[in-house]
Amino acid sequence: GSGSGANILGQPFVFDDVSNVTDSILGLVGRNLYDTPNHPLHITRKLIESVFQYPLYKNHIASNPVVTTKDNFDVLGFPKDHPGRSRTDTYYVDSQTVLRTHTSAHQHAAFQYMSQNPEKGYTICADVYRRDSIDRSHFPVFHQMEGARMWQQYRMKTTKGGTRLMGQEERKAQIKEDLDNLPEHSLEIIDEGGHHNYKTNPVQISHDEKESELVVQHLKRSLELLVQRVFTAAQEAMPGTKQEQLKVRWVEAYFPFTSPSFELEVFWQGEWLELLGCGVTKQEILNNAGLNDRIGWAWGIGVERLAMLLFEIPDIRLFWSQDERFLSQFKEGQITRFKPFSKYPPCYKDVSFWVRPSPDGASPIGAESSSGVAAAAGGDSTKASPAETQPAAFHENDIMEVVRNVAGTLVEDVKLVDEFVSPKTSKKSLCYRINYRSNERTLTNEEVNSLHDQVLQQLTKLPIEIR
Ligand code: PHE
């Protein structure tokens, strides 16, 4: 890299002391996998969009991931000390600019669009970026989709050629009517989750309780219909598997930008899986976009996680593969079961080092991750409650970043395998095991040794002492 700046999609940026983007991460910007026909991420995106269609919904994509910290965090109500803002979790281009960590970074712009246009809702699909651990379900770039829907209080309505204004009671009646008009589904709902805790997951003070509840019901039903559509398609594509009754459950959640908030879990192949996060949009966010007269909901989903379930893709790195043995398996509009074409041998290398104990006793390891429901394929981001610990001098994600930088998709996972504190020096020793394995070929010893040497070399820049 240039060391002092970067050009991202034709736009120049000067680095400052907060910048932590790397050439390897910037090299993944602009691939637009979600917009590549016959790619499983594109197929999944289209399947989700099919449930949220024009003229009610406008389907957007957002190809430039560079956004302001204001749009990614501030306008969404993230507290100043939210862990999602830390440099250990987020890629900063400079102190004011990040690679978006979620599609919610575009809420403000999408809401402004809605104030000028007739659609009542939208979806956005985009690539998002998070510093995180390395394993088969986490990659620093992944994809999210977000949806929103709103109802307007004062709407011009044509009755026999005339127009009139609609008040709040009529807006409520409209939500009820739209709810009643949503199709039925045959999912089994295990836990309605409707009796939310009014202390931790409240109806917003500016909202009418009944109206908020109607929005919640419309939100839940819409997402249940999404699950029905998507998972029925997957069941039909896999004649080998039993056509089991689909089951979902609602769980309370926390996001800075919705209240009340929920997560939807689906029972799939014997397990309850977190699928998406959602809630009633905070009124301040609507008001700030000039939508004072509206009320509405929003949801966000991780596209890889869903695609991995639907197509039975076992490793998130495969989405980035240019190998025809992967790409040729998928056809637009179809869900098919992925047939693994290889399992090349793993090559494990350990690295051990000393770290100083963190002053506040906080653990930088497996620290409450800020990657989210709508995350790659697991974890929790924006949903983390405020007021967590400050980042320590050493953070596990910095090891991950070094490994990503050197080895990219040639690493399958990095795991902490040993940890102890020296009684003499009270320094902590950590040992991480790096699993070098390609999805596409057998790596040679020389190649792995060279990669590992570079990793060791780059680790010397971290506040650790290699043993
Ligand atoms: N942006 C949230 C995430 O990344 C998901 C979400 C979107 C939740 C919209 C609620 C509403 O986890």
Image (cartoon, grey):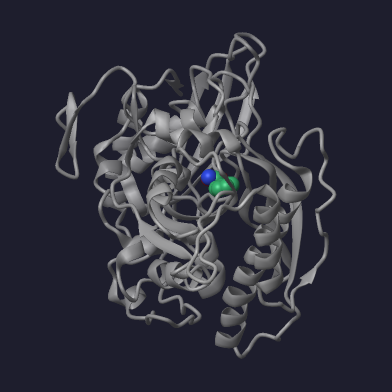
The quarter in which the N terminus is drawn is top left
Instruction: Residue 456: give x, y in percent of width and height.
Output: 35, 32
- Residue 434 appears in the picture as rendered: no
- Work out whether residue 177 or residue 39 is closer to the camera in this orientation and state it: 177
Q: Is residue 326 left or right of residue 303?
A: left
Q: Is residue 383 left or right of residue 304?
A: right
Check the image and report above or below for 76 versus 54. above
Farthest-out residue, bottom: 239
Check the image and report above or below for 338 versus 381.
below
**What x and y, as percent, mark residue 28?**
28, 50
Of 344 and 158, the residue lying toward us: 158
254 or 99: nearer the viewer: 254
User: Which residue is pictured at 60% across the width and 69% down the height?
Assistant: 226
Number of numbered discs overlaid on the protein picture:
0
Location of residue 343 in the rendering, given as x and y in whole percent from the top left corner? 44, 69
x 81%, y 59%: residue: 192
Residue sitting at x 68%, y 52% = 263
Query: Is residue 457 rendered to the left or right of residue 157?
Result: left
Please determine whether, in this image, residue 334 is positioned above or below residue 254: below
The one of 409 and 252 positioned closer to us in this rendering: 252
Is residue 62 something one can see in this rendering?
Answer: yes
Question: Is 350 situated left or right of 323 in this image?
Answer: right
- Residue 356 screen position, x and y as percent: 54, 14
